[in-house]
């Protein structure tokens, strides 16, 4: 979904990378509220859903009635929740003055959802860098950046319903830790180098070989993506796309393991036969499995999963690059199958056709769901999808011509 990154040093206000505090009652964020079914605020940024569907019941991990409350619009802020039991107002992310009571109220058992949020916010942001204005009036309190960064609050506003949902994430969660983020970044960089290597091998007409450590890394990354992406606030379309990419990656990782095991077994058999016959072992010949293994597709699928997890959305700077590479590779397979492999009626042709169908389905899912969830309007979605598809077709045709010219005597 469209997202806006937040600066983690602009206490106490929410701002975009050192700019002025975010304005909720006019400008782009106000238009986003008017045209969206959901607006999310967390330490990863502000996201909203304009062209995708986000039912209220989607928030399966926020079902508790004490964590959903009415929050009507407020001037100069996202919204303001009325705490009836305390005769007070809890203002969310004001853009002018962020206030907090100098002396917290006496511990009062929260009687409703607004009271529970008031109680949780009163206990947070004790650090000196929160920079919030202290007031003697105990009936005023504002939620600000420190609630997101230091205390891991997440908020989801449904503008059409005037309803707010909130939660407090576990600080000990490994998939939100700095170690996990660093590991994901290193894996993304390594896998992208393998994608570039595969593209170079395609142009040179060489086999896209896979090794054990890359295959194991792909398997580990895909398995870890299940609990990792389950913690992301994805839209319904993004969750469907995540499941498609995970199944696609697991299937082709299994093919990679089978291919590697077969090559190892075949090499051992040839070596044993050479020893028994007292002759030199024949040089390994390039087999169909060497050239038909789908390493590029599974690499891009895992890269999409990991980058979406890091950004909490599929609208990342890498989305267009990955979609174009995926589309170019898929259209190149369409041309190869139509012009070459379809001439033969054998098991290998059936395998190539099955791989082609899987690649086409995955590419269409990425093109449809990822681009639609990242678009800010219907017209932007249509133009972006058409442009990416056109670039994929032209790139695939160009790559086919390059490979054909290199193979020509």
Image (cartoon, rainbow, N blue to C red):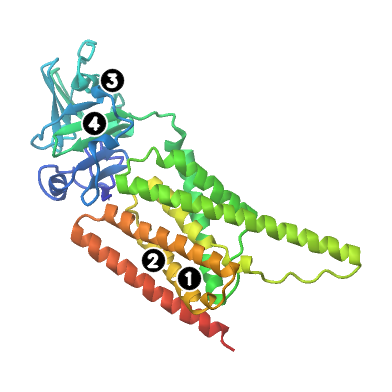
Please state which of residues 403 and 117 is positioned toward the viewer in this rendering: 403
SS for dot 1 = helix
The crowd level at tag 2 (other Cα within 10 Å; few <14, some 14-19, many 20+) is many
Q: Which sits earlier in the primary sequence, circle 4 or circle 3?
A: 3
Q: Which residue is mark 2?
A: 324
Q: Which sits earlier in the primary sequence, circle 1 or circle 4?
A: 4
Task: Evaluate if marks 1 and 3 touch, with contact meaning CB atoms under 8 Å apart.
Answer: no
Q: Which sits earlier in the primary sequence, circle 1 or circle 3?
A: 3
On the rendered structure, is 90 left or right of 344?
Answer: left
Q: Which sits earlier in the primary sequence, circle 2 or circle 3?
A: 3
Q: Position of residue 234 (x, y in %)?
A: 32, 43
SS for dot 2 = helix
Measure how far apart labels 1 and 4 are at the Cα level.
Answer: 46 Å
Q: Position of residue 264 (x, y in %)?
A: 72, 57
Numbered label attached to residue 333:
1
Residue lying at 36% horizontally and 40% vertically, measured from the top left: 232
The quadrant of the picture occupied by the C terminus is bottom right
Q: Is residue 214 visible?
A: no
On the rendered structure, is 150 left or right of 78?
Answer: right
Q: Which residue is mark 4?
A: 165
Measure how far apart labels 2 and 4 are at the Cα level.
Answer: 37 Å
Q: Position of residue 13 (x, y in %)?
A: 21, 37
Which residue of the protein is positioned furthest toward the bottom in this rendering? 409
Q: Which residue is mark 3?
A: 123
């Amino acid at each position: 979904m469209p997202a806006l990154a937040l600066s983690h040093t602009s206490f106490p206000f929410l701002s975009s990378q050192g700019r002025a505090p975010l304005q909720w009652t006019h400008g782009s964020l106000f238009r986003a509220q008017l045209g969206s079914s959901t607006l999310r605020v967390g330490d990863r940024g502000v996201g909203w859903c304009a062209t995708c569907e986000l039912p209220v019941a989607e928030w399966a991990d926020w079902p508790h009635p004490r964590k959903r409350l009415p929050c009507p619009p407020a001037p100069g802020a996202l919204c303001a929740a009325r705490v009836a039991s305390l005769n007070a107002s809890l203002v969310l992310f004001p853009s002018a003055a962020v206030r907090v009571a100098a002396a917290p109220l006496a511990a009062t058992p929260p009687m409703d959802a607004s009271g529970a949020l008031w109680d949780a916010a009163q206990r947070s942001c004790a650090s000196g860098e929160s920079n919030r204005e202290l007031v003697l009036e105990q009936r005023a309190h504002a939620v600000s950046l420190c609630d997101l960064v230091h205390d891991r609050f997440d908020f989801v506003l449904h503008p059409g319903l005037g309803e707010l949902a909130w939660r407090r994430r576990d600080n000990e969660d490994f998939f939100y830790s700095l170690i996990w983020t660093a590991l994901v970044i290193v894996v993304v960089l390594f896998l992208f180098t393998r994608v570039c290597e595969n593209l170079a091998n395609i142009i040179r007409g060489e086999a896209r070989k896979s090794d054990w450590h890359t295959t194991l890394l792909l398997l580990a990354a895909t398995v870890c993506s299940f609990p990792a992406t389950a913690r992301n606030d994805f839209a319904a379309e993004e969750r469907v796309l995540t499941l498609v990419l995970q199944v696609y990656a697991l299937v082709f990782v299994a093919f990679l393991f089978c291919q590697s095991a077969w090559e190892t077994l075949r090499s051992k058999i040839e070596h044993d036969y050479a020893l028994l016959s007292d002759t030199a072992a024949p040089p390994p010949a390039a087999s169909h499995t060497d050239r038909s293994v789908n390493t590029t597709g599974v690499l891009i699928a895992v890269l999409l999963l990991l980058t979406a997890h890091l950004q909490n959305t599929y609208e990342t700077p890498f989305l267009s690059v990955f979609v174009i590479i995926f589309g170019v590779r898929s259209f190149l397979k369409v041309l190869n199958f139509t012009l070459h492999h379809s001439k033969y009626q054998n098991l290998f042709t059936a395998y190539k056709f099955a791989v082609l169908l899987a690649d086409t389905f995955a590419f269409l899912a990425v093109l449809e769901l990822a681009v639609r969830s990242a678009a800010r309007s219907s017209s932007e979605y249509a133009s972006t999808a058409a442009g990416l598809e056109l670039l994929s077709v032209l790139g695939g045709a160009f790559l086919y011509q390059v490979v054909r010219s290199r193979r020509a005597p």
